Amino acid sequence: MKPSSFVTHLECLVCGKTFPHKNIFTCPDCGVQGILDVQYNYDKISQHLTPNTLNLRPLNHWRYRELLPIAENIPLPHLHIGWTPIYDVPRLAKEIGIQKLFIKDDGRNASSSFKDRASSIGVLKAMEFGFNKIACASTGNAASSLAGLSAAVGLQSFIFVPKHAPEPKVTQLLIFGATVFKVQGTYDDAFELCRASCGKFGWYNRNSGTNPFLVEGKKTAGLEIAEQMKDNLPDWVVVSVGDGCTIGSIGKGLQEMKRLGFIERVPRLLGVQAEGARPIVDALYSGNDLLPAQTKTLADSIDVGVPRNWRRAIQQIKLSNGEMITVEDEEILEAMRQTGKLTGVFGEPAGIACVAGLKNAIAKGMVKPNESAVCVITGNGLKDIRSAQSAVGEALNVEPNIGAVEEMLLKKY
């Protein structure tokens, strides 16, 4: 297959050493901390990627193909990925105390999560490099997206999930035909076991914490925000943070759209971690290297004690003059209730944590009430029904007659 002619090289985020565009994961000199970043020929891209050419392209994330590190002649998956809707949500804005609020609902992707953006690149890179088997470790969303995309293109997938992964996510994996290993340990245990298995059995490793190409798929959310909101660009883009690659990739996408002239400025990034899983927040504000942490939060997708892509997250937050904040689990559940009730968007805990974080940031003066923001909801609430049930309580049991309904209404209201 002919590789992308727009990619120039890979560059280590730690030491700056460069490498050719090939199947390589981390910098040999820096080890697992040496995350690589894909670099492009932006002058060449600017000749092909223009507002006029974009107007002629399908509304999915492949419209930005020049900014994606995929082979030029590789068949694309048939599943719809990207160009998820952005909603103006004035009632939620009033509730949390901000002048203008938008929600980008990435639960509308094929497997109901943001991770489809990354997995779509992962399966294509596996095929480009000659693999027919692919694996990842995940608390659920990355896994289900990889299993679904693998099924779409005909790859065999092997998935490692921690023991606390929600059953709906595990079921989705099995439906897509994946071989699922439920690791009796944490996400970090699952990550290391997956990495070792890929090395031993010769599988392609989709883990976005170390695979430099996966970030490029995730950044399409930033590219879309810039294009969809170019006439009403928000002051803030708010993103939940676990491993660090999601906020880092969205930041990269926004920076690229500014570099290519699609927007005049980059919105500030607000990263949100759970109070029980806050290693990147601590690293950002201490100015020190990240320290591994013991974590505990109901938001399973951001329950990460050893984030692999923390440097990219901090780099992009600083580039945008952004901030980070933490939220308690109860604040996440409250945000689930309020977002669902006031917008009709059902987000899972990790996906909705950004709304709770924005509310906290406004209360603490970090975000001003007269500013605007877009919250990226990264996963659908049906992914974690148990948390949703704890957020909303039980339905009303009623006898089949109108008098019983009237009595129940009087009690409730």
Image: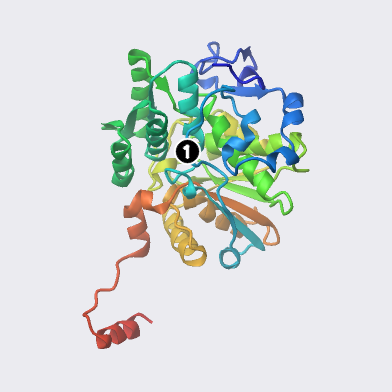
Task: Establish if 201 lies above or below 190.
Answer: above
Q: Is residue 152 left or right of residue 262?
A: left
Question: For the point 64% across and 62% down, which residue is it?
Answer: 98
Question: For the point 56% across and 64% down, which residue is it?
Answer: 92
Q: What's under tag 1, amino acid-wise?
A: Asp
**Picture mark count:** 1
Q: Is residue 335 left or right of residue 10?
A: left
Nearer to me, 2 or 275: 2
Task: Establish if 32 lies above or below 81.
Answer: above
| Quadrant for the N terminus in the image | top right
Nearer to me, 81 or 211: 81
Question: For the point 46% across and 21% down, which residue is it?
Answer: 127
The residue labelled by disc 1 is 116
In this view of the protein, can residue 186 be seen by the observer? yes
Task: Establish if 236 lies above or below 183.
Answer: below
Task: Establish if 119 lies above or below 44.
Answer: below
- Label 1 environment density (alpha carbons within 10 Å; few <14, some 14–19, many ≥20): many
Q: Is residue 91 left or right of residue 303?
A: right
Nearer to me, 111 or 52: 52
x, y percent for residue 215: 55, 31
Q: Is residue 183 left or right of residue 206?
A: left
x, y percent for residue 273: 50, 44
In the orientation shown, which residue stands out farthest toward the bottom? 403
x, y percent for residue 114: 49, 42
Quadrant of the image occupied by residue 30: top right
- How is the structure coloured here? rainbow
Question: For the point 64% across and 14% down, which residue is it?
Answer: 18
Q: Secondary structure at mark 1?
A: helix
In this view of the protein, can residue 320 be seen by the observer? no
Nearer to me, 390 or 52: 52
In the orientation shown, which residue stands out farthest toward the left? 399
